[in-house]
Image: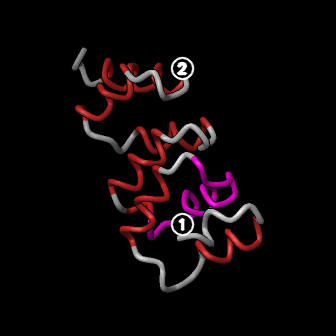
């Protein structure tokens, strides 16, 4: 856990790629706002980890995730989570607006 939060990008990247890391740890790291953008990018690029709903939700609501990446994960979220993202002040405005558009498409607003 400490190595993933290391300031050195090489150390943090090596720690997140470790085969001993568990899915629960990845879920926690996806929500963490104090990780480097490199670690967040590695998590978002790993298909095995992004199969988990909690990882997708964590990445969609994390302000360090690039907006395009976060919007991609919004498409897979449930309506109740989209509503909370839409109302949240912690996410970027384009992400909240995209959540609103998705709900409007589904006729839930």
- The residue closer to the viewer here, 24 or 98, is 24
Q: Residue furthest bottom?
A: 20
Circle 2 sits on which residue?
Answer: 93
Residue 109: image location, x then y, percent: 25, 14
Q: Nearer the viewer, mark 2 or mark 1?
A: 2
Which residue appears at 50% of the width and 29% of the height?
91
98 over 81 or under it: above or below = above
87 over 51 or under it: above or below = above
Which circle's residue, 2 or 1, is located before the other in the chain?
A: 1
Circle 1 sits on which residue?
Answer: 46
Is residue 54 highlighted in magenta? no
Q: Main secondary structure of the magenta part?
A: helix
- The residue closer to the viewer here, 54 or 89, is 89
Q: Determine whether the residue tagged by mark 2 lies in a helix, strand or loop.
A: helix
Mark 1 Cα within 10 Å, few/some/many (few <14, many 20+)? few
Is residue 46 highlighted in magenta? yes
Rendered image: mark on residue 66: none
Separation of marks 2 and 1 at Cα, in angstroms: 26 Å
Which residue appears at 45% of the width and 70% of the height?
48
Whether label 2 touches label 1, CB < 8 Å: no
Q: Which residues are magenta?
A: 34-49
Residue 31: image location, x then y, percent: 46, 50
Q: Residue furthest top?
A: 109
Residue 4: image location, x then y, percent: 60, 68
- The residue closer to the viewer here, 66 or 37, is 37
Residue 62: image location, x then y, percent: 51, 41
């Amino acid at each position: 856990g400490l190595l993933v939060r290391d300031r050195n990008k090489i150390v943090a990247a090596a720690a997140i790629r470790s085969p001993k890391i568990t899915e629960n740890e990845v879920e926690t790291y996806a929500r963490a706002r104090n990780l480097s953008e490199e670690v967040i990018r590695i998590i978002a690029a790993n298909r095995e980890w992004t199969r988990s709903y909690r990882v997708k939700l964590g990445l969609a609501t994390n302000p360090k995730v690039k907006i395009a990446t976060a919007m991609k994960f919004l498409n897979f979220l449930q309506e109740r989570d989209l509503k909370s993202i839409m109302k949240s002040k912690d996410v970027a405005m384009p992400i909240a607006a995209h959540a609103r558009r998705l709900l409007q498409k589904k006729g839930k607003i």
